[in-house]
């Protein structure tokens, strides 16, 4: 007996060759924007796990993006490490810091947890700006190298984009496996009703820490790719505003939806670039689009699709009920006549 391929997994596998060849004709800036979309999709996947699946409000994802970026920049520029080794260390460091930050999540919830993570983001930004001996301060770290893997130089825009695409595919498959594992079901159970989840034997403390740690690790992984993508980092891209934009990314795409981070990252990072064709009006137009989206569909862009599907299902059910009424009436008529 053959098992059918999961539709979500099928879409991921079909999208990979399309994204591999589609940007081939773009110039360097276009390749940078598309690669940035993939990098921020990875960071949004981590926040989507923490917020959308585990139900934990976090304003620290921009800080973990910075931790991964600075760790990779320091290791590759100052210590001469390779990017793969730096990537693993940056991801592991973010995972460890996420566990430490996850402890307050055991005591506070909702907006109180948001305040805790907000304070953490401010601390990370201040360290990056003031500790010049380590981070370069406001002058940043320059000449971050792009790797050479298996004899292939990834210094070019298209080559590095395809490298980022491969890493994104691997991390997407990891996230898909995680969400379909008992861990993913435990995260959903905690989000829906923590008391009921505890009554079913789920260790609330352990899974809360795990959600924070894994989400943070994805943020660090994204930062590790961001550093060689831009080849220069300073504290500005990792200010508190970065965490708010990533939060908007998850909400706009659809929190708790598997493809929400990709749709939201397109909305937050690629749409403003497309709107630059309108000149000085692009920020006003983008802000108007955000306001309309929040008012029309608080569940995000993918929430519109879900609402459309629900509407179609309701109309189909109403049509079936309407068609069944005459038949029921005809069946009841003769029975009543014979009884009389």
Image (cartoon, grey):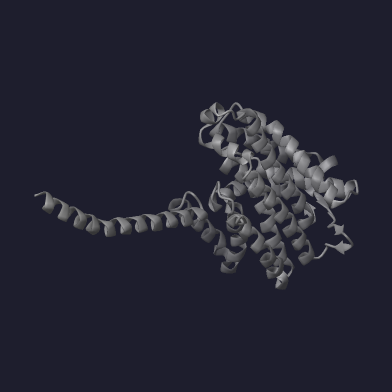
| Residue 199 location (% of width, % of height) | 54, 26
Q: In the figure, 225 relative to 49: above or below? A: below
Q: In the figure, 60 relative to 254: above or below? A: above
Residue at the farthest front position: 338
Residue at the farthest left position: 340
Q: Who's the residue at 88% across and 60% down the image?
A: 150
Q: In the figure, 101 relative to 19: above or below? A: above
Where's the N terminus, which quadrant? bottom right
- The foreground one among 195 and 278 is 195
Q: Number of marks in the image?
A: 0
Would you say 265 lies left or right of 67 here? left
Q: Who's the residue at 16% across and 52% down the image?
A: 335
Q: Who's the residue at 31% across and 59% down the image?
A: 319
Would you say 33 lies left or right of 250 here? right
Q: Who's the residue at 79% across and 45% down the image?
A: 70
- The foreground one among 317 and 155 is 317
Residue 137 in view of the camera: no
| Residue 338 location (% of width, % of height) | 12, 52
| Residue 204 location (% of width, % of height) | 60, 29
Residue at the farthest bottom position: 25
Would you say 151 lies left or right of 319 here? right
- The foreground one among 305 and 295 is 305
Q: In which quadrant of the rendered view does residue 259 lie?
A: bottom right
Residue 197 in view of the camera: yes
| Residue 186 location (% of width, % of height) | 59, 36
């Amino acid at each position: 007996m053959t098992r059918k391929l999961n539709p979500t997994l099928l879409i991921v596998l079909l999208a990979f060759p399309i994204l591999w060849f589609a940007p081939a004709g773009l110039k360097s800036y276009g390749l940078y924007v598309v690669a940035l979309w993939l990098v921020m999709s990875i960071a949004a996947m981590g926040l989507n796990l923490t917020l959308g699946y585990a139900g934990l409000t976090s304003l620290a994802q921009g800080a973990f993006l910075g931790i991964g970026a600075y760790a990779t920049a320091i290791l590759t520029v100052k210590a001469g490490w390779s990017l793969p080794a730096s990537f693993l260390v940056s991801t592991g460091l973010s995972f460890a810091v996420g566990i430490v930050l996850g402890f307050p999540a055991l005591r506070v919830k909702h907006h109180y947890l948001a305040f805790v993570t907000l304070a953490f983001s401010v601390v990370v930004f201040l360290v990056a700006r003031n500790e010049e001996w380590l981070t370069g301060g406001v002058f940043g770290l320059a000449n971050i190298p792009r790797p050479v893997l298996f004899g292939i130089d990834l210094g070019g825009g298209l080559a590095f984009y395809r490298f980022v695409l491969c890493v994104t595919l691997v991390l997407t498959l990891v996230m898909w496996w995680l969400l379909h594992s008992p861990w993913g079901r435990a995260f959903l159970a905690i989000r829906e009703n923590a008391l009921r989840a505890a009554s079913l034997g789920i260790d609330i403390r352990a899974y809360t820490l795990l959600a924070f740690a894994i989400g943070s690790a994805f943020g660090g992984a994204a930062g590790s790719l961001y550093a060689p993508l831009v080849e220069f980092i300073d504290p500005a891209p990792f200010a508190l505003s970065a965490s708010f934009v990533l939060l908007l990314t998850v909400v706009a795409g659809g929190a708790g939806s598997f493809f929400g981070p990709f749709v939201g990252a397109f909305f937050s990072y690629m749409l403003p670039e497309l709107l630059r064709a309108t000149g000085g009006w692009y920020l006003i137009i983008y802000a108007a689009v955000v306001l309309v989206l929040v008012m029309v569909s608080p569940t995000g862009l993918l929430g519109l699709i879900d609402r459309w599907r629900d509407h179609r299902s309701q109309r189909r059910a109403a049509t079936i009920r309407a068609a069944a009424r005459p038949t029921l009436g005809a069946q009841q008529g003769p029975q009543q006549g014979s009884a009389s």
